[in-house]
Image (tube, helix red, strand yellow):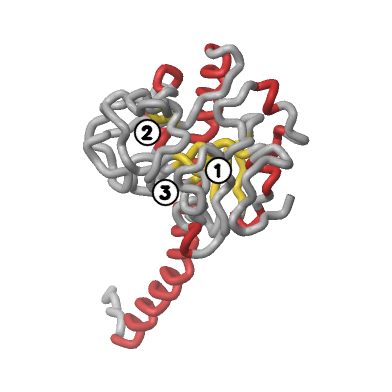
Amino acid sequence: MVRRALTLIELIVVIAIIAILAALLFPVFAQARAAARKSICQSNLKQMAAALTMYRSDYEETNCRYRVCPNRAGDPLCLTHAPPTADTGPNEAWWAPQDSTQSWDVPPRAINRPGLLAPYVKDYGIFRCPDYTGQVGYAMSYVSGGPMGASDAAVNAFPDIGRVMVIWDHARTPGCADTTNYPTAAQKPPFTPLTGTAAATHYPPRHSEGQNVLYYDGHVNWRKPSTFRDSEFRLPGSHPPTATPLPP
């Protein structure tokens, strides 16, 4: 039996059908990959939550600080250090691991400063968000009145510890507070505004126009930055005021 070959028109129709199917399926695949990266990011944060809990247990129920600067005379807790990206000396330690030979904006080559949480994690990879190429894809809040460096008892004074934000998606340095309007002040509020070009470093909407947030009680949630409230960063009534007012 002689098999009939496809005509040119039939071949064009087949190619067109394949192209239509590809156009329909490629966005689905892209969304699936984005969802997988978001899930990995959330898993990273949950592992950090476990590390923070173990740290607190070892340090008399006191929370980890975002950074210590023992080489900085008179300011070992980096309270008035500016600019925040500047290195303070060989003994500096952030909560997250660092390759001090590289900028925060690029991947690390070799970790030479393990960080304050190093004894409680097995893999430094958890500090790198799959949707960010810099050294650390997250920041710990060092907002005045927030949980950083505070006792567990002090944090329990919050109206709802399940809404207290501890770590979230971030770019550049792994600490977040308003150092633009309060560069050398010992007390710093949350950075505002929450959206726009100025906010892109502090609250990057890298996961489906939102970001992942770790809360004090250990759960992780996806949020749009525009929904953040002042009372999620710090105790109500804390000072100084934010540059742009936030809902309480």
Q: Residue at x 53, y 57 (%)?
A: 208
Whether residue 32 is visible, yes or no, is: no
Q: Residue at x 27, y 38 (%)?
A: 108
Looking at the rendered structure, the secondary structure element under dot 1 is loop
- Alpha-carbon neighbours of circle 2 within 10 Å: few (<14), some, or many (≥20)? few
Q: Residue furthest right?
A: 159
* Amino acid, disc 1: Lys
**Residue with the mark numbered 3:** 171
Mark 1 touches mark 3? (CB < 8 Å): no
**Residue with the mark numbered 1:** 188
Report the front residue among 5 and 23. Answer: 23
For marks 3 and 2, give the one nearer the viewer. Answer: 3
Q: Is residue 60 left or right of residue 6?
A: right
**Residue with the mark numbered 2:** 125
Quadrant of the rendering where the N terminus is positioned: bottom left
* Amino acid, disc 2: Gly
Q: CA distance from mark 2 to mark 1?
A: 29 Å
Give x and y (percent) for residue 61. Answer: 61, 16
Looking at the rendered structure, the secondary structure element under dot 2 is helix
